[in-house]
Amino acid sequence: MSNVKVAVRVRPINKRELDQNGKSIVDTNGDAISVTNIKVDSNAEYGDSRERIKTFTFDYCYDSTGEPHSPQYAPQQLVFQDLGTEVLQAAFEGYNACVLAYGQTSTGKTYTMTGIREDPGLIPRICEGLFSHVDDFEASDRTTFRVNISYLEIYNERVRDLLRPSLSQRNEKYTLKVREHPKEGPYVQDLSSHFVKDNEQIQTLLDKGNESRTTASTYMHDHSSRSHAIVTINFIQAKLDDDLPHEIVSKIHLVDLAGSERADPNWSLNYKGRLKEGSNINKSLVTLGNVIKTLAEKSILSWSTDSLGSTQSFASSGGGEGRASPFCSPKRMRLPYIPYRDSVLTWLLKDSLGGNSKTIMIATISPASICYNETISTLRYAQRAKNIVNKPKINEDASVTLIRELRSEIDRLKNMLSTSQMGESMLPIQDSGQALEQQLQLQEDRANKLTQTWMDKWMEAHEIIKESDLSIRGLNKASSMGVLIDSQMPHLIGMDSDILSTGVIIYHLKEGKTLVGKEDAKREQDIVLNGPGIQREHCLIKNVDGSVTLYPNRGSHCTVNGLDCKAPVLLKQGDSVILGKSQMFRFNNPAEAAVLRERRASQECLLDEPTSPSFMETDQHRTVTASRTHWDGVPYHEFSWSKNTTGAPI
Ligand SMILES: Nc1ncnc2c1ncn2[C@@H]1O[C@H](COP(=O)(O)OP(=O)(O)OP(=O)(O)O)[C@@H](O)[C@H]1O
């Protein structure tokens, strides 16, 4: 059990607040923070029912109201030292961790989480710390690590992938679906997950995600984040100790919430979109507030249920007077329903709030008197969050747990065997020496096989990932047969032309030009092919912003979906490409595939109606219909395949 830790950070007063005659009303003293209500007269003879000074205590208070670099200013480094290192420690121990920044708009959530280039915030510092520890460990220990990152935003209650560059750049209005896995809980379907090898790669992805985030100018803040942003880092550590595999997995959520705000009538009238945004932001923050409130109540209730339970048993054993009231008997007390599903945000953060995670909340506030009401409401929100009790546990890979259990069973059988051999026991027949030996052999075989499979899977994934921008995972949750190799870049998948080779080759089609030809071409070719019909300079493949076009060179033989290409052809997801006489490839465009999957899921028409069939070719085996249209309106060749006359699929 572990309570949510809560920190408060106060930012410097700003010009807008000073221009409105705002006074600084917040004081910190150690872990206590006091807010003065200047509307309550300190000398009021007959008093005022409202308190003039309200004091709250938290796990950490950061006073960043002074000049940066002055001793009075709590810097980013201090916040990282206290909170970031806790997150790292949890991750290395195999716990899930979460940091949530909450506060009124323009109070410093993004500054604290992301920071600025000269003075980075918690997210980049945690990533840097993660890789610097990984480097230390890899040098001194036999542990190997895998880090994956995804970055999403929830905008107007819809989910957007911030790391799918080509689609975000085109401003596609697409939404990802939130689904629930029976064991692993809520997740975002088709969210891209990127393997990162070092700090530089992760920082590049973070920058990319930050650039795509939805921001706008509001009356409170010129660069207000209008979405909730969640960076998720999956951190896996594995090692083999005395032939025993260890694999622990930690999920780190780093959340920069959109700011709560008052709607300014004049501003909102001019910006209708802002009003809808504002109401969606406030709605999900209200749900978050309800979840926090209910969880806090639940913790108090379960605490009192526990203490009532112990009082009762004490009373019934005749040891005291305490008797639980029939109105609050533990049996009657029903724990409240937690409204996680009322917003996408709370649904996705289900585990971080009241579940399997070590969670920290950072409440950010302004020191200005004009923000008094919002500041008090933020501090109350944060105060409640302190009462949430989570149940973090170390996340061990399921097959590793099984291997460990088998190994301890093997030790037990070995002990029994040696006892039976010494003839010291009166073992039943099924535990006789011979039966035990058989059982032992069986379990050892199982454990060895599982260990080998685990090692192969880990080494293979690790080696391939080292080489390229790929992610590899089991084909599906229910089966360990098969491995799915995923890449975020457009690519061609081919077979090695050597009939004795068993390899599958992935050719990434990088942004810009990829030359395809033979080794002895005048210019160096990016993809070198051999085999019948391949020309020295066979073709050129151009990737512009995720759109990939094949340009056949004069006289070279290229076909797409069975049609000869004499002119450039825009490739689409799933196209089958033959170069020369026998080199076959399948073209994959992950970004396009994701959009098509979404369309399929939302039961929209997968593709527009073909505008005009350009030709139809029929023979006794198949029918190929070709048309010109494209998923984003760009023309391309589209083919539909029917079955052959015998009904067997082609
Ligand atoms: N601790 C701090 N020290 C110095 N400047 C700060 C601090 N916190 C915030 N600021 C400044 O205050 C302004 C608002 O900060 P920020 O954008 O982080 O607010 P926010 O809470 O994320 O706002 P929103 O919810 O509207 O996105 C920025 O100009 C930022 O540089």
Image (cartoon, rainbow, N blue to C red):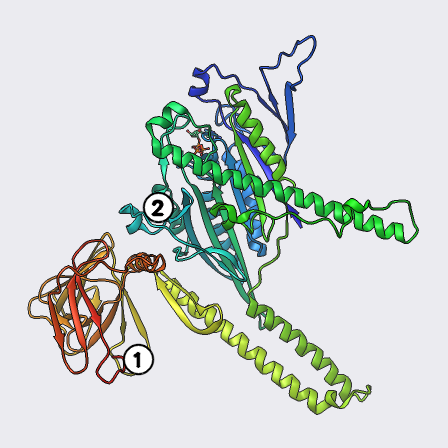
Q: Say which residue label 2 marks.
A: 208
In screen coordinates, is 241 left or right of 283? right
Q: Is residue 585 above or below residue 98?
A: below
Q: Amino acid at mark 1?
A: Ser
Q: Quadrant of the C terminus?
A: bottom left
Residue, x 60% and y 52% (percent of image)?
355
User: Which corner quadrant of the image does residue 483 belong to?
Assistant: bottom left
Q: Is residue 19 above or below residue 363?
A: above
Residue, x 42% and y 34% (percent of image)?
278
**Residue nearer the viewer, 63 or 18:** 18
Residue, x 82% and y 46% (percent of image)?
324
Q: Secondary structure at mark 2?
A: helix
Residue ranking furthest to the left: 554
Q: Position of residue 26 (x, y in %)?
A: 57, 23
Q: Position of residue 288 (x, y in %)?
A: 54, 41
Label 1 CB sits under 8 Å from any ligand 1 atom: no
**Residue nearer the viewer, 8 or 76:** 8
Q: Amino acid at mark 2?
A: Lys
Query: Callout 1 environment at 10 Å: few (<14), some (14 to 19), or many (20+)?
Result: few
In screen coordinates, is 315 left or right of 594? right
Q: Say which residue label 1 marks.
A: 501
